[in-house]
Image (cartoon, grey):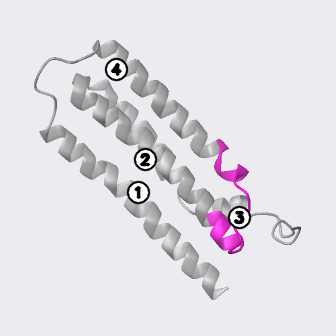
Amino acid sequence: MAQGMATRRVATLVWGSSLVVPFFFLALAGTARWRGECPAPPATVFAIAVAFSALAVTLSRLLPPRLGGARAGPEATVFTRLLLGWALCEAGALFPLVAWIVSGDPRLIGVFGLALLALVLLFPSDHRWASLAPPPSAGRSH
C-alpha cells in the first residue's frame, strides 16, 4: 500500500506540473504574439484550433481506459493512463495558444480555458484512480 500511495503522490505532482505549464506558455504567448500578417484567415485558424482541442480532450477520455495493463502492476497502469489523458489535455490547451499567437483571435483564449478545465477535471482523485485501475485478474491472465 505504501508504494501505491507514493505512486499517487507522484501522479499528483505530474498532474500539477501539467496544469502549470500552459499558464507559463500563456504568459510567453502574450509577449510573443505574431506581429505580422496572419498566414491563414483567422476564422480558419480558429476552426482548426477548436477542432484539434475538442479532439484532444475527447481522446483524453476515450483512450486511457483502453491502454493495456502495465507489467509493473496496477499502480503503474493507472499512472500511465492518467499521464496519457493529461498529455492530450495539455496539447489541447497549448495548440489554441499557438493559434492565438498566429491569428490574434481572443476567442482562442476561451478554447485554451476549456481544454485547461478538462485537465483540471482529470485530477487523480480516489474515484478517478479507482476508475482507471485494471480488473484484478488483468495482470495475471497471460
Residue designated by label 1 = 18
Q: Residue 100: x and y, percent?
A: 26, 29
What kind of residue is marked 2? Glu
Which circle's residue, 1 or 3, is located before the other in the chain?
1
- Asked if disc 2 and disc 1 are in contact, CB closer than 8 Å, the reply is yes
Q: Residue 54: x and y, percent?
A: 51, 31
Residue designated by label 4 = 45
Q: What is the number of the mark on residue 90?
A: 2
Residue designated by label 3 = 130
What kind of residue is marked 1? Ser
Estimate the spatial distance between the alpha carbons at disc 4 and disc 1, rounded to whole Å: 25 Å
* Foreground disc of the pair 3, 4: 4
- Secondary structure of the residue carrying tag 4 is helix
Estimate the spatial distance between the alpha carbons at disc 1 and disc 3, rounded to whole Å: 21 Å
Which circle's residue, 2 or 3, is located before the other in the chain?
2
What kind of residue is marked 4? Val
Asked if residue 122 can be seen in this view, the reply is no
Residue 112 horizontal side relative to residue 128, left or right: left
Q: Residues within 10 Å of mark 2 (few under 14, many from 20)?
A: many
Estimate the spatial distance between the alpha carbons at disc 3 and disc 4, rounded to whole Å: 39 Å
